[in-house]
Amino acid sequence: MANKDHIGRLRQGVSVWNQWRTQHPAVVPDLSGENLSRERLERADLSRANLHKTDLSYAKLTLGANLHEADLSGANLSFADLHSALIEKANLGDANLHQANLHFANLRGADLSGADLSDADMTGAKLSGADLRGANVKQTRFDRVEGLKESEKADLRTRGALFQGPPTYWELRYLK
C-alpha cells in the first residue's frame, strides 16, 4: 500500500519531488497500487521506488525520467510514454506495457519476464541483459535496438516481434 506522504509529495510536482529525493536519498518511495494514470512525470526521480501494481497508464515518463531499479512488477504502463527513460535494472515482471512508447529507453538488465509488450515501440531501446522470457511481444517494434543477440532476435521474431517497418506514430511524433 502506498505511503500517503510519498504520494502527497509527488502530487506537489516533479521539482518538489526531486528535491525531496535529493534530500532523502536513503528513503525508498512507496507508491505501490496508486493511480498515477495520465500523470506528467517527466524527469521524475523514481529510482528504487516501489511502484508494484501502480496504474501509470498514459503517464508521461520522458525526458530522462529515472526508474533505475524501480519495482514496476504488475504495474499498468499501457499507452505510457517512456521515451528516453532510464529503466535500467528495473523489475517489470508481469507489467502491462501494451502500446507503450519505449523509444530509446535504457532497459539494460531489466526484468521484463511475463510482461505484455504487445504493440509497444522499443525502437532504439538498450536491451543488453534484459530478460524477455515469456513476454508477449506480438507486434512489438524492435527496430535498431541495442544489446540483443541474433539468437534472441530470432526467438522474438517467432513470437511475433517486428524488427523493420515503416515509421511508427512515436517516430513521426518525435522526429518532426
Image (spheres, rainbow, N blue to C red):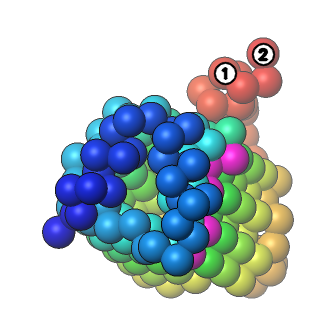
Q: Which mark is residue 3?
A: none
Residue 139 is at least partly visible in this image: no
| Residue 65 located within the stretch drawn in magenta | yes
Residue furthest to the front in view is 23
Quarter of the image for the N terminus: give it.
Answer: bottom left
Check disc 1: other Cα within 10 Å, few if <14, some if 14-19, many if 20+: few
Q: Is residue 78 left or right of residue 170?
A: left
Q: Residue at x 71, y 73 (%)?
A: 108
Tell me the residue that label 1 is attached to.
173
Q: Residue at x 29, y 51 (%)?
A: 7
| Residue 54 located within the stretch drawn in magenta | no
Residue 44 percent coordinates (x, y): 55, 47
Residue 29 is at least partly visible in this image: yes
Q: CA distance from mark 1 to mark 2?
A: 6 Å
Q: Quadrant of residue 36?
A: top left
Quarter of the image for the C terminus: give it.
Answer: top right
Whether pointer 1 and pointer 2 mark residues with C-beta atoms closer than 8 Å, the reply is yes
Q: Is residue 102 left or right of residue 59?
A: right
Q: In the rendered view, tell whether residue 126 sits above or below residue 104.
A: below
Q: Residue at x 71, y 83 (%)?
A: 129
In the image, what residue type sits under mark 1?
Arg
Residue 168 percent coordinates (x, y): 64, 32
Q: Which residues fall within the magenta stretch?
A: 64-70
The answer to which of 154 and 117 lies nearer the viewer is: 117
Tell me the residue that label 2 is attached to.
176
